[in-house]
Image (cartoon, rainbow, N blue to C red):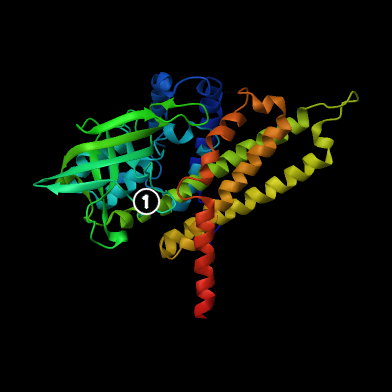
Amino acid sequence: MDFQISEKMKVILGMINEFVDKELIPLEAHFTKMEFRDGLELFEEKRKMVKQMELWAPNHPKEYGGMGLDLVEHGLVSEALGRTPLGHYIFGCQAPDAGNIEILHKYGTPEQKEKYLGPLVAGDIRSCFSMTEVNMPGSNPVMLETTAVKDGDDYVINGHKWYTSSADGSKFAIVMAVTNPDAPRYLNASMIIVPTDNPGFNLVRNIPVMGHEGSDYASHGEIIYQSCRVPRKNLLGEEGHGFVIAQDRLGPGRIHHCMRWLGICNRAFELMCKRANERVITPDGKTLATQQTIRTWVADSAAEIQAARLMTLYAAWRIETVGASEARNDISMIKFVVANTMQTIIDRALQVHGGLGMSDDTILSYFYRHERGARIYDGADEVHRLMLGKRILNQFQKS
């Protein structure tokens, strides 16, 4: 793997970091205290600035108005944007839209691309991904209760989903539902596009997470599909290939998440070091930075971030060179390693800040609340560890 960053990427990253520092981080004091919907007008102004700088939609196809960066390049961008909760949204590469764009681009029909993909890349609309179910274990995605039954030229969808992130304000959902109940489990489900204004699509509520139910993009919806009828032409890809498409979506998506988490690590680490150097703890002017425990935390954090970062970039490089299937062990590793590294770094930074860290006067408490889910979504840590261990042991059994 070549660790050299091209001159083009150095310029891009420099511009992004400057924009984040000057335009986005100063907004955080207001962002953490307001509803997301109340900031839409301001956020749109920032998005227009990004488009004028030609930095919009870094990982999306050029033919639809994106920058067309590859996975490693976008990983570096995602790390830079992850330093603030607003980064990915303002630059038009936020989840779940990013993943939906990838699968629409690969599997969408010309009509679907014109109706949904183009406006989605342009940032004119938002979307959501409806897979997780209330009564089914997210750790075993082939267990689905939601069904889509063929009726003439339509599918009729019935089911109960939750943690459909950003459903509030979305124009459409991509829904995972069982279409072929008699087929093998990994071939019995399909992805179907459902407009959110369709009869039978019922957004029940935004689920309160850590005491905050959120709004608009910053929310997680609970949805009931009740005799929700959509044309069969809304099928994404082939019928029964929902899990195949999901794997195409989740591989690159894991890189996006992990590099974003590393951006959070970098921000928390920076805040921790600054606080340690500034916080006076004795009458003679000694600071927290003079304490052995703090120095050990700083050293450990620097090493852990570096290790997690190299592991993630290697996984991205592997996906690019050998494909997501061959790189599945690398993908599993980074999920639990980077998520736990982030949790540790945020916790240390908050501890160094003391009472200030518990308040909303820094971004740390926001990170602490909103990023705990990293060890659960996209597969719980324990599941990734179990499956990785099983695959590794099987390799030795065959040798």
Callout 1 environment at 10 Å: few (<14), some (14 to 19), or many (20+)? some
Residue extending farthest left = 152
Q: Position of residue 20 (x, y in %)?
A: 52, 31
**How many numbered marks have been drawn onto this rendered protein structure?**
1
Q: Left or right: where does residue 254 sit relative to residue 116?
A: right
Q: Quadrant of residue 238?
A: bottom left
Q: Is residue 70 visible?
A: no
Q: Is residue 157 visible?
A: yes
**Could you tell me which secondary element the residue under label 1 belongs to?**
helix
**Residue drawn at x 67%, y 28% as measured from the top left:** 357
Residue extending farthest bottom = 399
Q: Quadrant of residue 196?
A: top left
Q: Left or right: where does residue 234 sit relative to residue 80?
A: left
**Residue drawn at x 14%, y 49% as measured from the top left:** 150
Q: Position of residue 230 (x, y in %)?
A: 17, 40
Along the line of sight, the residue nearer the viewer: 177 or 340: 177
Q: Left or right: where does residue 337 sit relative to residue 52?
A: right
**Residue drawn at x 50%, y 50% as measured from the top left:** 380
Residue extending farthest right = 284
In this rendering, is residue 272 above or below 313?
above
Task: Residue under label 1, please give it.
Answer: 249
Q: Position of residue 364 (x, y in %)?
A: 61, 31
Instruction: Kindly identify the amino acid type of the residue bearing the numbered disc 1.
Output: Arg
Along the line of sight, the residue nearer the viewer: 300 or 366: 366
Q: Position of residue 113 (x, y in %)?
A: 22, 43
Along the line of sight, the residue nearer the viewer: 113 or 229: 229
Q: Left or right: where does residue 169 sit relative to residue 139?
A: left
In this rendering, is residue 139 above or below 2?
above
Along the line of sight, the residue nearer the viewer: 396 or 271: 396
